[in-house]
Image: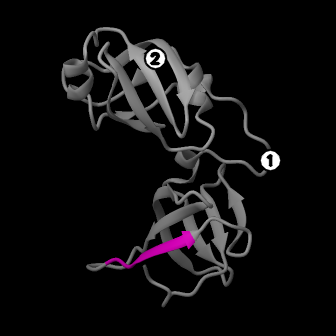
């Protein structure tokens, strides 16, 4: 859902860079999961949208030093806290590991990650070529993406094999 950028103020609040323009998952979740050693989740005491980021007060983070120590933590929320998506809406996590096919039916690769450049999402696709897989950065827009079936983990794109990233 995002990562902690660092401290926000001196009273233990953290600044979070969300991976979505609408970070409803972060704003509504009462627990944020992470993979750092020693603790698996933060209890969210307060959270609010602040400009292009989220700021939060987390249990057990009482001062600026503790907030700075959490810098870089990747954050997740329970799927149940997220709102349902509309027919043509997708959570980035649902796109990761999808097989990407060309319109011809040939396999281009699998989605390794999804980025947001502020205008639209970018599918980062890695081919299955061994020993040196190719990498593709495909804009997640209707001009290039014709089909998304998250149930079948399948995305069909209008792309060329020689359009590498």
What x and y, as percent, mark residue 23?
A: 58, 34
Give the structural element (helix, strand or loop) at label 1.
Answer: loop
**Disc 2 marks which residue?**
31
Indicate the quadrant where residue 146 lies.
Answer: bottom right
Is 137 within the magenta? Answer: yes
Toward the viewer: 41 or 56?
A: 56
Relative placement, left or right, of 56 versus 23 is: left
Indicate the quadrant where residue 113 lies.
Answer: bottom left
> Which range is magenta?
133-138
In contact (CB < 8 Å): disc 2 and disc 1 = no
Q: Looking at this view, name the residue that lies furthest to the bottom.
A: 162
What x and y, as percent, mark residue 29?
A: 54, 19
Q: Looking at this view, name the residue that lies furthest to the right.
A: 87
Toward the viewer: 110 or 6?
A: 6
Magenta-colored segment: predominant secondary structure: strand
What x and y, as percent, mark residue 72?
A: 28, 38
**Disc 1 marks which residue?**
87
Q: Looking at this view, name the residue that lies furthest to the front.
A: 9
What x and y, as percent, mark residue 9?
A: 34, 21
Q: Is residue 163 above or below residue 45?
A: below
């Amino acid at each position: 859902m995002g990562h902690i950028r660092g401290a926000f103020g001196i009273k233990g609040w953290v600044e979070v860079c969300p991976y979505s323009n609408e970070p409803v998952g972060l704003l509504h979740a009462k627990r944020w999961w992470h993979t750092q050693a020693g603790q698996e989740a933060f209890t969210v005491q307060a959270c609010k949208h602040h400009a292009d980021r989220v700021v939060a007060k987390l249990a057990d983070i009482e001062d600026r030093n503790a907030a700075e120590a959490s810098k870089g933590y990747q954050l997740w929320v329970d799927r149940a806290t997220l709102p349902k998506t509309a027919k043509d809406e997708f959570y980035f996590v649902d796109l990761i590991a999808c097989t990407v096919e060309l319109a011809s039916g040939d396999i281009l690769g699998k989605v390794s990650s999804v980025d947001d450049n502020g205008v639209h999402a970018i599918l980062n696709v890695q081919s299955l070529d061994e020993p040196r897989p190719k990498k593709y950065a495909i804009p997640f827009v209707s001009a290039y993406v014709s089909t998304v079936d998250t149930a079948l983990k399948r995305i069909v794109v209008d792309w060329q094999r020689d359009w590498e990233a």
